[in-house]
Amino acid sequence: MQYSKKVIEHFRNPHNQGRIKNADAVGQVGNLACGDVMKIYLKISENKKGESIIKDIKFETLGCAAAIAVSSALTDRVKGMTLARALTIEKDDIVKDLGGLPPIKVHCSRLGVEALHQAINQYFKK
Ligand code: FES
């Protein structure tokens, strides 16, 4: 299986790549399978109902094309979402958004989601 069009688009033109100065939360995870690293930065605010939402999100990675594409699609999906809802996002949701990943690359999709969940959990602990 090759990369889907969407994976290639996100890899060539990643959305929300970079860092947020004064982020409200940061999550960082490593992939034991390949040694790659992913960092997610969050800026949090409240919506009209008083729920905490992801106002802004950025990622930095030392990862492969699949990890970059997944993080780009993930950040698009969760921007503006409540933290509670974002915690329910799983890697398979993002793989679906991207039209699938080659089986050998599916492990790369956990990095972004795990870093996001870690950042949110860190925020709740504050
Ligand atoms: Fe390391 Fe894909 S090979 S994240």
Image: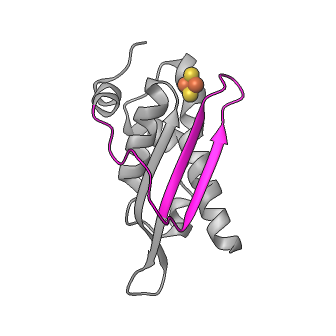
Which x, y percent locates residue 46? 44, 81
Figure quadrant of the C terminus: bottom right
Say whether residue 110 is magenta.
Answer: no
Most common SS among magenta residues: loop
Figure quadrant of the N terminus: top left
Name the residue furthest top. Answer: 1
Ligand 1: quadrant of the figure = top right
Say above or below: 121 vs 118. below
Count how many numbered circles sit on residues in the image: 0
Q: Nearer the viewer, residue 26 or 22?
A: 22
Left or right of 14, for residue 1: right
Say above or below: 21 vs 104. below
Left or right of 119, for residue 53: left
Name the residue furthest bottom. Answer: 49
Which x, y percent locates residue 72? 39, 42
Q: In the image, what residue occupies the spot 49% across and 61% down?
A: 42
Name the residue furthest front. Answer: 21
Q: In the image, what residue occupies the spot 56% across and 17% down?
A: 104
Q: How is the image coloured?
A: one colour
Which x, y percent locates residue 78? 42, 57
The stretch of residues the image draws in magenta is 13-42
Q: In the image, what residue occupies the spot 51% across and 60% down?
A: 86
